[in-house]
Image: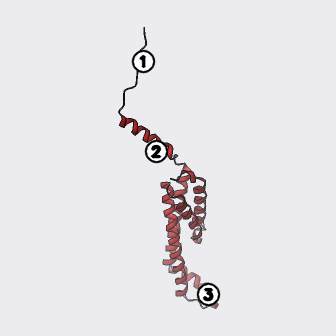
Amino acid sequence: METEKISPTPQSIDDIQESNHEYEQDSQYPKASPMLKIAGFLLLFAGILIIIHWIYITTSSDLIDTLMSTGVYDNMNITRSDLAAVFNFCGIIAIALSLFTIIGGILTLQKRMFWFALIGGIVGIFAIAPLFFFVPNILSLTGAILIIRSRKEFH
């Protein structure tokens, strides 16, 4: 009994080109590692915590009253409104920096624009959040380190 060679079903040229194109896309960009996803979520979480922190500080009159009642500012001729103005100024700067951190987290999750994502992580280190014991700053630093380690995965 003679065995017949079974040939694969003929494909159209469009099918062959489409399958080759899919293969090229898969081999061009490596799969996202969990480190990159963790870095993106760390930056997002850090940015949100910094915004919450500074909104609380700038809108809380209790904090300013507590600081004024300690007597530390008596010899410095600093009034309640001066202290509120300093907090508002620092809050605006910190919220602007945290927006860069949030954008860096989004870009990290999308694996786009490595340098901007890294800058977002680094900027989050400088948007201090002392009421949260500097946890957002540590999260931003960790996210920036993970971004550097995963730089080859960016498009």
Q: Earlier in the sequence, mark 2 or mark 3?
A: 2
What's under tag 3, amino acid-wise?
Tyr
Question: Looking at the image, which is closer to me, 5 or 110?
Answer: 5
Q: Nearer the viewer, mark 1 or mark 3?
A: 1
First-in-chain label (1 vs 2)? 1
How crowded pointer 3 is (Cα within 10 Å; few <14, some 14-19, many 20+) is rated as: some
Q: Which residue is mark 1?
A: 5
In which quarter of the view is residue 132 placed?
bottom right
Taking the spot 51% from the left edge, 62% from the top edge, the residue there is 104
Q: Nearer the viewer, residue 1 or 98?
A: 1
- Alpha carbon separation for disc pair 1 and 3: 94 Å
Q: Residues within 10 Å of mark 2 (few under 14, many from 20)?
A: few
x and y percent of residue 129 in the render? 57, 70
Report crowding for label 1: few under 14, some 14 to 19, many 20 or more residues within 10 A (C-alpha).
few
What amino acid type should be assigned to the residue bearing mark 2?
A: Gln
- Which residue is the site of mark 2? 25
Does residue 146 lie above or below 79 as drawn? above
**Do labels 1 and 2 touch, CB within 8 Å?**
no
- Residue at x 62%, y 90% (from the top left corner): 74
Where residue 90 sits in the image (x, y, percent)? 54, 77
**In the depicted view, which residue is nearer to us: 65 or 133?**
133
Query: Could you say which quadrant of the image residue 11 lies in?
Result: top left
The N terminus - image quarter: top left
The answer to the question of whether label 1 and label 3 lie on touching residues, with beta carbons closer than 8 A, is: no
Q: CA distance from mark 1 to mark 2?
A: 33 Å
User: Which comes sooner in the sequence, label 1 or label 3?
Assistant: 1
User: For mark 3, what is the residue?
Assistant: 73
Could you tell me if the residues under marks 2 and 3 are in contact, i.e. CB atoms within 8 Å? no
